[in-house]
Amino acid sequence: MKKGLVALTLVGLMVGSVSSFASANSGYSWPVPDSKRITQKYGGAHKGIDIGGKRAGVAGDNVVSFYSGSVARAGWSTSYGWVVYVHHKIGSKNIQSRYAHLHLSPVVSVGQAVSSGTKLGIMGNTGQSQGVHLHFETRTCSGACKTDNSSTPFDPLANYFPGYKIAASASNILEADGHSAHHHDHSEVAEEEVFYSMEEINKMTSEERAAKGIPVK
């Protein structure tokens, strides 16, 4: 196998205009405006969807909030890497969305109000990840949303972006970053997971961050 190239399976999707679809559906914004490449769908042990970059294996695509809400968590997770949680009120439901494996630290802070389409960070490959992508989760909360795993994951495509239609079960492509598009399953964030808020991280020295596995950049 040539270095830097790996065969993978990519769910084939037939989509219309994301922007026009989102605007027609109560203000939902596709979380990666520049890429519609879904590299892993929701189901089984995988409690979210994975979205690859506009250019396979290349970090840097903007990641945005799919709906208006309030930032509940922003920082570093030993599982999710750089991650943001946003809490939403959609109709009568309390919903949490998660945006994982960001390339750099989030550009939003806890308590910040965000609109649909507000930039949260950029796509990357941090935490328990084996390729550049966004891991996007939506979860329903029985009461007020918390940042633990008391919420219940559900399929964001079926519920918020039903305009996405599977055109083929799979098609083979070559990813340029040398990694598979199928990533850590996030069936549940591990019990031993450690999370550091940006407030905690900003107080650390470079040496302390490195010792905890937190990127210095």
Image (cartoon, rainbow, N blue to C red):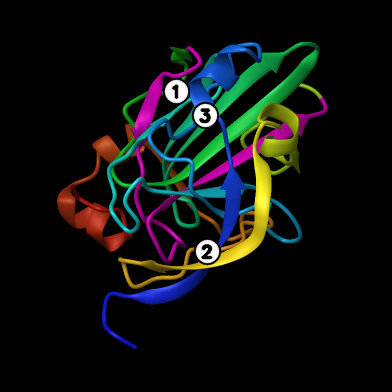
Discs 3, 1 touching: Cβ within 8 Å: no
* Pick the front one: 214 or 43: 43
Three-letter amino acid code of the residue under disc 2 = His
Tag in front: 3 or 1: 3
Residue highlighted by disc 1: 110
Spatial CA span between label 3 and label 1: 22 Å
> How far across and how far down the image is residue 79, in percent?
50, 57
Tag in front: 1 or 2: 2
The disc, 3 or 1, on the residue closer to the chain's N-terminal end is 3
User: Any mark on residue 183, and which?
Assistant: 2
Three-letter amino acid code of the residue under disc 3 = Trp
> How far across and how far down the image is residue 136, in percent?
55, 42
In the visual, does 194 lie left or right of 24? left
Taking the magenta stretch, the answer to whether it contains residue 129 is: yes
Spatial CA span between label 1 and label 2: 27 Å
* Pick the front one: 178 or 150: 178
Q: Which span of residues is magenta-colored?
A: 115-142
Discs 3, 2 touching: Cβ within 8 Å: no
Q: Is residue 70 above or below residue 176?
A: above
User: Any mark on residue 162, and which?
Assistant: none
Secondary structure under the numbered disc 1 in the rendered image:
loop
Spatial CA span between label 3 and label 2: 20 Å
Three-letter amino acid code of the residue under disc 1 = Val
Taking the magenta stretch, the answer to whether it contains residue 92 is: no
The residue at the far bottom in this view is: 1
Q: Is residue 95 above or below residue 11?
A: above
Q: Please report the residue visible at 24 percent of the width from the left and 54 percent of the height from the top.
A: 208
Q: Please report the residue visible at 49 percent of the width from the left and 32 percent of the height from the top.
A: 31
Q: Please report the residue visible at 76 percent of the width from the left and 60 percent of the height from the top.
A: 44
In the visual, does 169 lie left or right of 194? right
